[in-house]
């Protein structure tokens, strides 16, 4: 039974949240804010804060103002969030009501709905792996529960009996669309033994149900879906008017949790109308003062907006000694070295023995730190994000980079933005690797893509394409030494080819000169290095000295080394297997020659050797017809020499 003092304290938190809502609307009308999202009607969910422990995590919904305030967000924090001030949790980078509060383990919210669900399951999995008894509350709206990632997260949580409570706030609407008859609950798609329906406008009911769900999770009973029925008392946002799609009668019948709870406590004799009136006025005065003071605080310096894309540059790991062999064997060694650290876990499809991955990257590692995932790329990446948030070091295998599509939401919305949107309060050092590229007959459309430009386009992600065993081994070591996400793309054409040891130790960062030359600079990466080296050999027979540079790291790319070579040779050819339009190679050319020193060093227009904008077909002869070859590189070099 909840004691009276706790009930009154809970009501005060609800009232304070409501006053922050009211004041936010006033600040908007006064021009001090640009957008608001009201939490009015959702305040009773703050009761969950009374059953959580300090080590627990909350992945919030954008109407969870009262809940996140129960985890330590102050009125100042709310005001700074609204007005995007320098002192806000995002330094003005994230939209208002996209809550984050590192001291209270409130994990930064991203806009794509339900995208927080898989990382929440990942944090819950980390709790199980570490045995730290942390429970995760993942909050979302009922409209968001139709997203596939909600189902994937719930499935993963049920499969592994994870300590997570999915808090679904059902206010009946997804913006203007009624969700009646279309939610997973209405359709009978939530497991009955996991579903608890709650009057979400009754704080005591939320508290009682929340206590049971959290205790069940902490004791190893797995996840609960806490389905809370409540009303959204205000329009979807300040850009919406719900009178356009809701009748006057419907609006009049809505249940206000603060009014209900206040009446209940007054009728029980626990407080008076005078107390309510004085408390409302006190909060109004306090919140007004705070908001006005915060309005005068500075915004972040625009010159610093590029900070926090990456953390401090990791010290380069030791040079990799020449080893030769195959890239597959090198990756296996790198993963074996990685899992010597307890917090490192390898997660992906078929990675456990006896299969050891479809390409054998993990074969023989034989440890409980190598774990099979479901056939679900969003789960693989999303759960790994949660592991990283919890302080672990996940290494993720995607069977082919072609299959990254289902994980794109997690990669683009969560993985690559988390550090920047929280000004480094949260980090996400996930290492992803995937077989990449063509020149392996029989791959066809869905097993031959390169598309590196899709990933290099995302700020906050390191991208590396090793072409030798030494490059592969040192790339993984460098990725694990850093605190930012890294994608390692492994050329399928080269993976199983036995290579001779490098001529000298391989550095961790930067480009590598494969062949020195004086007449032309040829830059490539991955499978393109083989074409460039073959072309350089053919050109040497005719007396042409070509310098071949293996870029290796695409983000960050070694501009200095390429520029120095170009200034020596005066001629540049870039070789890639990706499609031409909007490609990384095209961007490299544009960025390089936009500088005066490099532009005026050119003795001829640079050339891009690339696949035309065409898919890679299945039949080997057709594949060869669309991919660049060494003769194409030779032709391009002769063009810049003529």
Image (tube, rainbow, N blue to C red):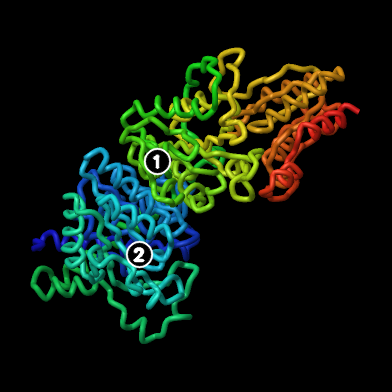
Q: Position of residue 14 (x, y in %)?
A: 25, 63
Q: Nearer the viewer, residue 79 or 642?
A: 642
Crowdedness near tag 2: few (<14), some (14–19) or many (≥20) residues, C-alpha within 10 Å: many
In percent of the image, x 25 and y 59: which residue is there?
A: 224
Q: Position of residue 21 (x, y in %)?
A: 36, 63
Residue depth check, mark 1 versus mark 2: number of the one nearer the observer: 1
Picture disc at residue 347: 1
Give the vertical position of 44 relative to 538 (above or below).
Answer: below
Q: Nearer the viewer, residue 310 or 619?
A: 619
Q: Is residue 34 left or right of residue 264?
A: right
Q: Does residue 50 show up?
A: yes
Could you say which quadrant of the image residue 388 lies in?
Answer: top left
In percent of the image, x 46 and y 63: which residue is there?
A: 28
Q: Secondary structure at mark 1?
A: strand
Give the vertical position of 611 relative to 97 (above or below).
Answer: above
Q: Is residue 226 left or right of residue 251?
A: left
Residue on which the image places disc 2: 39
Q: Which residue is outermost to the right?
A: 642
CA separation, marks 1 and 2? Answer: 37 Å
Give the vertical position of 573 relative to 75 (above or below).
Answer: above
Q: Which residue is outermost to the bottom?
A: 249
Crowdedness near tag 1: few (<14), some (14–19) or many (≥20) residues, C-alpha within 10 Å: many
The answer to whether the residues at label 1 and label 2 have Cβ atoms under 8 Å apart is no
Q: Nearer the viewer, residue 473 or 6?
A: 473
Q: Is residue 548 left or right of residue 46?
A: right
């Amino acid at each position: 039974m909840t004691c009276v003092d706790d009930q009154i304290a809970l009501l005060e938190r609800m009232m304070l949240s409501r006053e922050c809502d009211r004041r936010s609307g006033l600040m908007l009308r006064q021009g001090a804010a640009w957008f608001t999202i009201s939490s009015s009607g959702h305040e009773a969910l703050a009761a969950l804060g009374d059953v959580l422990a300090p080590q627990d995590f909350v992945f919030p919904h954008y109407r969870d103002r009262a809940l996140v305030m129960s985890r330590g967000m102050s009125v100042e924090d709310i005001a700074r969030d609204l007005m995007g001030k320098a002192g806000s949790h995002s330094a003005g980078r994230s939209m208002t009501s996209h809550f984050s509060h590192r001291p209270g383990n409130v994990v930064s919210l991203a806009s794509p709905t339900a995208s927080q669900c898989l990382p929440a399951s990942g944090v819950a999995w980390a709790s199980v792996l570490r045995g730290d008894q942390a429970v995760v509350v993942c909050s979302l709206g009922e409209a968001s529960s139709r997203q596939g990632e909600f189902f994937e997260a719930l499935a993963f949580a049920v499969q592994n009996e994870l300590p997570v409570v999915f808090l679904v706030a059902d206010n009946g609407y997804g913006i203007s669309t009624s969700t009646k008859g279309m939610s997973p609950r209405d359709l009978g798609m939530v497991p009955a033994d996991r579903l608890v329906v709650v009057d979400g406008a009754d704080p005591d009911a939320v508290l009682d149900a929340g206590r049971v769900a959290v205790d069940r999770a902490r004791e190893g009973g797995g996840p609960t879906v806490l389905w809370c029925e409540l009303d959204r008392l205000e329009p979807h946002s300040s850009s919406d008017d719900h009178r356009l799609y809701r009748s006057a009668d419907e609006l009049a019948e809505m249940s206000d949790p603060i009014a209900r709870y206040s009446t209940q406590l007054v009728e029980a004799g626990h407080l008076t109308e005078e107390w309510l009136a004085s408390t409302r006025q006190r909060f109004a005065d306090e919140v007004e003062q705070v908001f006005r003071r915060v309005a005068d605080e500075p915004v972040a310096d625009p010159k610093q907006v590029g900070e926090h894309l990456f953390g401090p540059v990791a010290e380069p790991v030791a040079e990799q000694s020449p080893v030769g062999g195959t890239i597959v064997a090198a990756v296996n060694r790198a993963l074996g070295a990685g899992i010597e650290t307890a917090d490192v876990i390898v997660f992906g499809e078929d990675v456990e023995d006896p299969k050891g991955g479809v390409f054998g990257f993990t074969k023989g590692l034989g440890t409980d730190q190598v774990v099979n995932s479901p056939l679900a790329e969003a789960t693989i990446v999303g759960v790994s994000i949660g592991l990283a948030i919890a302080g672990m070091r996940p290494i993720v295998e995607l069977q082919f980079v072609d299959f990254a599509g289902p994980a794109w939401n997690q990669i683009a919305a969560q993985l690559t933005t988390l550090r920047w949107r929280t000004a480094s309060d949260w980090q996400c050092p996930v290492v992803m690797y995937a077989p990449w590229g063509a020149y392996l007959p029989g791959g066809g459309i869905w097993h031959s893509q390169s598309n590196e430009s899709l990933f290099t386009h995302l700020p906050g992600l390191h991208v590396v394409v090793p072409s030798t065993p030494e490059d592969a081994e040192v790339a993984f070591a460098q990725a694990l030494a850093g605190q930012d996400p890294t994608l390692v793309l492994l050329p399928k054409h080269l993976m199983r080819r036995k290579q001779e040891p490098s001529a000298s130790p391989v550095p961790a960062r930067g480009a590598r000169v494969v062949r020195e030359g004086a007449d032309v600079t040829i830059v490539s990466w991955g499978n393109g290095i083989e074409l460039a080296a073959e072309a350089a050999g053919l050109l040497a027979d005719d007396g042409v000295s070509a310098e071949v540079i293996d870029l290796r790291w695409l983000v960050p790319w070694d501009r200095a080394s390429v520029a120095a070579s170009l200034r020596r040779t005066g001629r540049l050819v870039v070789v890639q297997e990706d499609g031409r339009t909007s490609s990384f190679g095209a961007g490299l050319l544009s960025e390089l020659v936009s500088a005066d020193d490099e532009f005026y060093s050119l003795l001829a227009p640079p050339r891009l050797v690339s696949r035309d904008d065409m898919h890679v077909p299945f039949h080997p002869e057709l594949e060869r017809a669309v991919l660049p070859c060494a003769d194409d590189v030779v032709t391009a070099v002769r063009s810049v020499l003529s």
